[in-house]
Image: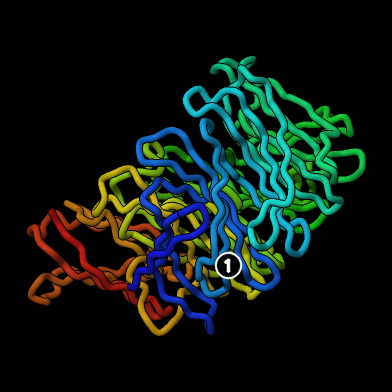
């Protein structure tokens, strides 16, 4: 895999590595500059240009800067823009296409050590990443920053939501909603005591708004003064890092996490047919196993038409150290129809520690997934690169060459290295498989038919060493790789 070193705007040094397949419109791009990078959002314009936002900080430093970049439909990085403050942390979290060639960026600025003195930031940029206009909005100075989200409405209004706090007590936590008109004047604001994070804020009609809170698990209806008039619970204990995609003015899809039954951490996808009523809702719980599967941090469900829904998250996340864990993890992507029937499931990674941060459906029928990559085996410093995968409609990284960094998997074997057992996860399209394990001399030492999506195979009788595993099935599955027993 080749690496190209280039200098871009504001002397940002970025590295590009990957195979570009313009005919198949699939690619893998890893971007790094030696700093700790965090992918936050992306949008694709009508020509296939992708605009994205990133948070950057020096390793072991708290102050952060905001970056904006764009890449073409072949995955080539075109240019970048750094938005930095000399003494404050600056983060961008969302990017929206206002109109062809004009984009809205939203984020925050605050003191890096105390996280006080929060300022909401709004930028307008053109397709060349030049700033057209900007605005700032100040929140209470004694509050600490927690979250911010934005949603750009068809009527030209920008809806902002988020949260801040002074302590852990109910009375010390607040969420807020804010409405900006086309001139970026604030025309509505309200604060809600006790809420930790409103993750989506939408206008239903001239007199009503809709919000969802990801920790309290509340869906709320607001009147024109942004006062709560109705509250319902999100069902099935779904919470944490919500992603919402509306398909009509009254129905939407929700991706979230599910902890029940304990001790499981699962990804769940729901479809609601009414904004403030759970009657007739649908649920698909993606798996129940011993690993933590966490929903995509932001924007984890998307579609162009809802007969092809893309959703995803991280397989084998470490909740206690979510970005710098010394264990393998995978991006997990699945596709469903409008009724949540899963067509296929794929995994990407396993050679490093990955966390999926964003996902969008693309105009060519495929999708883009992006997140962080911590190469703990080769770099012990707490430093992450960002990785972007452009996949076709079947979730495939297709082309003439194998992608060594993030080869696609339809079954995964872990832990690797391991000791007394193998854990095997089959993608949903492969309900059964044959596992074969060969020693270093090519002798078959284990053969077992698997009949479940999750299987645990005892190997305590085998001596330490390197083995070759093979997983195969009549459904087209063929996965091979090395497994090391300690």
Q: Nearer the viewer, residue 40 or 248?
A: 40
Q: Which of 389 and 443 is in front in this view?
A: 389
Can you identify the residue that label 1 sits on?
A: 367
Q: What element carries label 1?
A: strand
Q: Is residue 13 above or below residue 207?
A: below
In this picture, residue 154 sits left or right of residue 140: right
Quadrant (top left, top right, bottom left, bottom right) of the N terminus: bottom left
Q: Is residue 371 visible?
A: yes
Q: Nearer the viewer, residue 318 or 225?
A: 225
Q: Which of 227 and 190 is in front in this view?
A: 190
On the image, the x and y values in percent for residue 23 come to 53, 84
Q: Is residue 443 left or right of residue 22?
A: left
Q: In this view, does 71 lie above or below 121?
A: below
Quadrant location of residue 481?
bottom left
Relative image position of residue 296 (x, y in whole percent): 53, 50
In the rendered image, residue 207, in percent from the top left (x then y), is placed at 91, 38
- Left/right of residue 370 with respect to residue 201 in the rendered view: left
Residue under the point 85% across and 42% down: 181
């Amino acid at each position: 895999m080749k690496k190209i070193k280039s200098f871009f705007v504001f002397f940002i040094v970025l590295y590009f590595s990957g195979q570009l397949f313009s005919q198949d419109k699939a690619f893998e791009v890893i971007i790094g500059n030696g700093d700790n990078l965090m992918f936050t959002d992306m949008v694709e314009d009508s020509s296939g240009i992708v605009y994205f936002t990133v948070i950057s900080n020096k390793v072991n430093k708290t102050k952060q800067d905001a970056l904006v970049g764009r890449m073409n439909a072949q995955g080539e990085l075109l240019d970048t823009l750094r938005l930095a403050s000399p003494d404050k942390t600056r983060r961008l979290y969302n990017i929206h296409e206002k109109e062809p060639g004009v984009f809205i960026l939203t984020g925050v600025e605050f003191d890096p050590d105390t996280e006080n003195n929060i300022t909401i930031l709004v930028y307008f940029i053109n397709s060349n990443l030049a700033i057209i206009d900007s605005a700032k909005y100040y929140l209470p100075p004694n509050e600490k920053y927690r979250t911010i989200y934005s949603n750009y409405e068809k009527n030209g209004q920008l809806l902002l939501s988020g949260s801040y706090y002074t302590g852990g007590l109910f009375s010390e936590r607040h969420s807020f909603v804010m409405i900006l008109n086309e001139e970026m004047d604030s025309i509505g604001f309200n604060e809600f005591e006790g809420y930790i994070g409103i993750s989506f804020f939408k206008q239903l009609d001239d007199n009503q708004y809709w919000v969802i809170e990801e920790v309290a698990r509340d869906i709320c209806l607001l009147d024109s003064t942004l006062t709560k008039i109705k509250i319902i619970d999100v069902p099935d204990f779904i919470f944490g890092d919500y992603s919402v995609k509306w398909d009509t003015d009254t129905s939407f899809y929700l991706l979230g996490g599910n902890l029940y039954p304990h001790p499981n951490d699962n990804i769940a996808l729901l479809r609601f047919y009414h904004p403030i009523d759970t009657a007739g809702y649908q649920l698909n719980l993606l798996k129940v196993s011993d690993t933590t599967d966490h929903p995509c941090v932001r924007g984890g469900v998307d579609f162009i038409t809802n007969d092809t829904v893309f959703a995803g998250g991280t397989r084998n996340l470490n909740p206690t150290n979510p970005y710098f864990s010394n264990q393998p993890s995978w991006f997990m992507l699945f596709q469903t129809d409008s009724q949540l029937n899963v067509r296929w499931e794929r995994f990407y990674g396993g050679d490093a520690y990955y966390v999926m941060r964003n996902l969008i459906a693309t105009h060519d029928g495929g999708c883009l997934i992006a997140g962080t990559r911590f190469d703990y085996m080769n770099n012990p410093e707490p430093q992450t690169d960002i990785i972007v995968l452009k996949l076709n409609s079947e979730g495939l990284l297709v082309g003439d060459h194998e992608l060594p960094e993030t080869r696609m998997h339809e079954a995964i074997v872990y832990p690797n290295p391991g000791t007394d057992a193998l854990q095997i996860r089959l993608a949903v399209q492969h309900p059964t498989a044959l596992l074969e394990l060969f020693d270093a001399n090519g002798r078959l030492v284990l053969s077992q038919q698997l009949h479940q999506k999750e299987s645990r195979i005892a190997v305590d009788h085998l001596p330490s060493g390197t083995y070759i595993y093979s997983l195969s099935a009549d459904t087209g599955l063929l996965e091979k790789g090395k497994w090391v027993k300690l």
